[in-house]
Image (spheres, rainbow, N blue to C red):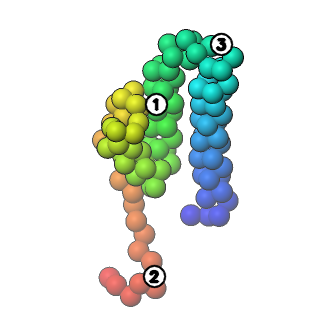
């Protein structure tokens, strides 16, 4: 994979997680402290499902490690909300298999 392609993938993943983090800070910390705790609580499940759906699409498109991370998160029912783990459950079936290219210096056929 070309270095420019890898950088674009990296940027896309970083932008996604930065926006998710900022969204969490806004809703769960800032708005909750200035009197919108009820609104944050009422919309939490819907917001979590949207984030998980966007992550699932990203993981399918990116494949590789990000997909493996999503599949790991499915198993962490003790850490993540149910809304997220239910949405990510589709990662086990939707991700296309990776095609591996044999490295020419491996010496194996």
Instruction: Please tell me how crowded label 3 is: few (under 14), some (14-19), or many (20+) other residues with Cα within 10 Å.
Output: few
Q: Is residue 80 visible?
A: yes
Label 2 belongs to which residue? Answer: 104
| Label 1 or label 3, whichever comes before in sequence order | 3
* Disc ID at residue 94: none
From the image, tell me which residue sits under label 3: 35
Please report the residue visible at 59 percent of the width from the left and 35 percent of the height from the top: 20
**In front: 61, or 41?**
41
Q: From the image, which quarter does the C terminus lie in?
A: bottom left
Give the CA distance from mark 1 to mark 3. 28 Å
Where in the figure is residue 108, as x and y percent of width and height?
A: 34, 84
* x then y, percent, for residue 86: 34, 31
> In the drawing, does residue 60 fall left or right of residue 15?
left
Label 3 sits on a secondary structure element that is loop
**For numbered disc 1, what is the local secondary structure?**
helix
Which residue is identified by label 1?
53
Residue for point 45% across, 37% down: 56
User: CB atoms at circles 1 and 3 under 8 Å apart?
Assistant: no
Marks 3,2: beta carbons within 8 A: no
Measured from the top left, where is residue 45 in percent x and y? 45, 21
Left or right: 100 as drawn, with respect to 92: right
Q: Nearer the viewer, mark 1 or mark 3?
A: 3
Q: Are marks 1 and 2 in contact (CB under 8 Å)?
A: no
């Amino acid at each position: 994979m070309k270095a420019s392609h890898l950088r674009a993938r990296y940027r896309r993943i970083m932008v996604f997680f930065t926006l998710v983090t900022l969204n969490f800070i806004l809703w769960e910390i800032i708005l909750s402290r200035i009197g919108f705790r009820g609104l944050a609580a009422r919309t939490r499940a819907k917001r979590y499902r949207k984030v998980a759906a966007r992550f699932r699409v990203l993981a399918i498109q990116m494949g590789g490690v990000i997909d493996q991370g999503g599949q790991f998160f499915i198993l962490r029912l003790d850490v993540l909300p149910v809304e997220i783990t239910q949405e990510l459950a589709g990662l086990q079936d939707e991700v296309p298999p990776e095609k591996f290219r044999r490295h020419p210096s491996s010496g194996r056929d």
